[in-house]
Image (cartoon, helix red, strand yellow):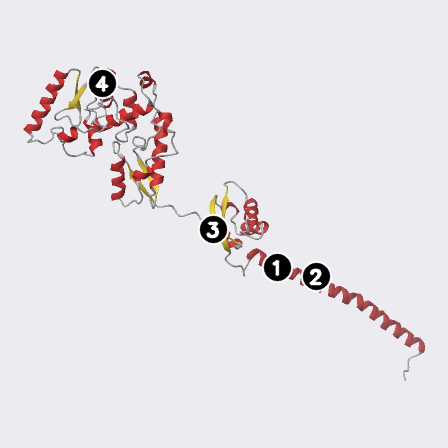
Amino acid sequence: MSNRTPHERDAARRERERRVGAGRPRSIVARVLAVAVLLIAIGAIWFLVELFQPFHGSGQGSVVVTVPSGVTAGTIGGELAREGVVSSGFFFSLRATLAGDRGKLLAGTYRLRRGMSYGAVLSILTTPPKAAKVTNVTVIPGRTRRQIAALLHQQGVGGSYLAATRHTNLLNLGSYGAPRRLDTLEGFLFPSTYQLREPIRIASLVADQLTTFRQQFATVTMGYARRKNLTPYDVLIIASMVEAEAGTAHDRPLIASVIYNRLRLGMALGIDATTRYAVNNYSSPLTDSQLNSPSPYNTRNHVGLTPTPIDNPSLASIEAAAHPARTSYLYFVAKPCGNGASVFASTYAQFLADAQSYDAARAKRGGRSPVTC
């Protein structure tokens, strides 16, 4: 039995009840706090997994994405998310910020995969592309389509240059006065040095040549030629003859003047370079049969200009063809020991005398060319 009085027993009971009542709220709060901490921990883990994607695969499929210059990481992330490359544009932007890559994203067109990790995409978008390996291809003024094709073949360039230079959509040939049914781009293949990516694509070279031609030819005024009833295409044909015949810059407008004068008088041009083009002989003396070739390119037997240019002339020759010297010259012949220069004559008698001087100098050298001494 207890020795406590009834009053003491009542007090003890009330104290126990008070303690039990006070403990229940504290235990509920503790449980709530524990659950909250657990949820925060789970949320933090989810957030970190979403952000750093430690178990993410390498992606699949293929998608092309273009990143414009000057856009923000958020804009790029949104586009990547729309294309399915990343799962969230927000997390991509945040990951770029944490990695210090927001200002390193490079503009360009990229081939990516769907479902890539943020880190993998950032690695691609912040890595500058390797410099493309390029090769310089030099086309010398005065070379023909056939000669350029042979040069490319010798250098191991695949494809057919001749086939690629028959027609084009890059130039309106009719605007130059070219025939409608033209099956050659001879004359339009501007000579220069072109830097091309490897492996060299003939289509790229031809496109560069035609683009450069359009730009360069547009700088030449055609007023004088038009007054002589010549089209831009006629000027291009004349320029190709000037390129083939002129050995010095000084002679270009003089040779052009001979061509203009002969056209005006209805005389055959008599230019050997046109016959060489017709018979594809650029190194050996022309034979009698070649000189009498019935080809429309043989300007000994046909009056007027050739059907097309006979090579691809430089801008200097085009300028000379558009603005010939004002002379009475009708003839020219290589000058002995002139290092490429010619002598010009207005009369046939003077031409014969100049030709005899040339022949005598050649005979003196045992039949070898006396042009360079």
Q: CA distance from mark 3 to mark 4?
A: 66 Å
Front residue of this view, candidates 199 and 351:
351
Report which residue position mark 3 lands on: 124
The extreme right residue here reads: 6
Q: Is tag 1's residue or tag 3's residue first in the polypeptide sequence?
A: 1
In the picture, the disc for residue 204 is: none
The amino acid on which the numbered mark 1 sits, given as a three-letter code, is Trp
In the picture, the disc for residue 36 is: 2
- The spot of residue 59 in percent (x, y) is 51, 56
Report helix, strand or loop for mark 4: helix
Report which residue position mark 4 lands on: 262
Q: CA distance from mark 1 to mark 3?
A: 25 Å
The amino acid on which the numbered mark 2 sits, given as a three-letter code, is Ala
Left or right, 26 with respect to 266, comes to right
Asked where in the image residue 172 lies, by quadrant, the reply is top left
Residue at 58% from the left image edge and 57% from the top image edge: 50
Instruction: Assess whether mark 2 and mark 4 are in contact (beta carbons under 8 angstroms).
Output: no
Report helix, strand or loop for mark 2: helix
The answer to whether residue 218 is seen in the rendering is no
- The spot of residue 125 in percent (x, y) is 48, 48
